[in-house]
Image (cartoon, grey):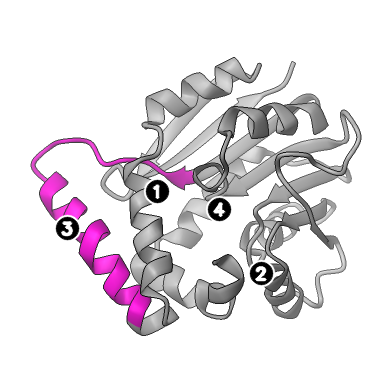
Amino acid sequence: MFDAIAGRYDLMNRVMTMGQDQKWRRFVVKMAGDPGAGLTLDLATGTGDIGALMTETYPQARVVGGDFSLNMLKEARKRFAGKQQISWQACDANMLPFGDDIFRSVTFGYLLRNVDDALRVLREVRRVLKPGGRVVCLDTTPPAKNMLSPFVRFYLQHGIPIMGKFIARDEAAYAYLTGSTMDFYTAEQLAQLFSEAGFVQIGYKKFMCGTIGVHWGQKI
């Protein structure tokens, strides 16, 4: 599915988030902290936005951008061909092809709602982090029930699939996105999952009417 929408993924992200997605990615990079000249891993890198922002914010950083979708990696390589600090690599988040204690930070956007076992992935992320390293996760979160929730749910259930049909030319992919958002962990549940994976100093912040969450934690 992600191979099929790779070519219009960035445009669709900008439109359906009303241009806010880059702000969230900058917050992810800020929370990850400066790795110095060390290695940092951006999982589910997609077309490479977080990895590129990492190199712009922390010029000494060396970034590995990993993704399961080869077409996404192809787009990332094309978009950021001049970024010599980034190495693009196909990988499976369930079984990362890296040794223990390698990375000073691991970031990912929209990864956990697309895997079968989020706890397994978080434990694998913890394995490749250096002690003291930070994990930062950007993902959707089900909207809370309040006065805005009927409008938010209508937008998620109907607005985004319609945009997907006309912009990305794949209504089914964005109908899936909506379903995976509604069925995903709440922000509180995801924070608990980070704790079960062995992380400490866990926190999170919500954006866009509570439909986006950024979670973070640290390996000791």
In depth, the one of 159 and 25 nearer the eye is 159
First along the sequence among labels 4 and 1:
4
Q: Which residue is mark 3?
A: 154
Position of 64 relative to 121 (above/below): below
Please tell me whether the stretch drawn in magenta is mainly helix, strand or loop.
helix
Q: Secondary structure at mark 2?
A: helix
Q: Secondary structure at mark 1?
A: helix
First along the sequence among labels 1 and 3:
3
* 186 within the magenta span: no
| Quarter of the image where one finds residue 67 | bottom right
**How far apart are the alpha carbons under marks 4 and 1?**
24 Å
**How far apart are the alpha carbons under marks 2 and 3?**
29 Å
In depth, the one of 10 and 183 nearer the eye is 183
Q: Which label is found at residue 180?
A: 1
Q: Mark 2 against mark 4, which lies toward the viewer?
A: 2
Name the residue located 57 percent from the left edge and 47 percent from the top edge: 111
**How far apart are the alpha carbons under marks 4 and 3?**
28 Å
Q: Which residue is mark 2?
A: 72
* 144 within the magenta span: yes
Near mark 2 (Cα within 10 A), the count class, few <14, some 14-19 or many ≥20, is: many
Give yes or no for contact between labels 2 and 3 (Cβ–Cβ under 8 Å): no
**How far apart are the alpha carbons under marks 1 and 3?**
15 Å
The magenta segment is 139-165
The answer to whether residue 66 is seen in the rendering is yes
Name the residue located 31 percent from the left edge and 75 percent from the top edge: 163
On the rendered structure, is 50 left or right of 21? right
**How far apart are the alpha carbons under marks 2 and 4?**
20 Å
Q: Which residue is mark 4?
A: 26
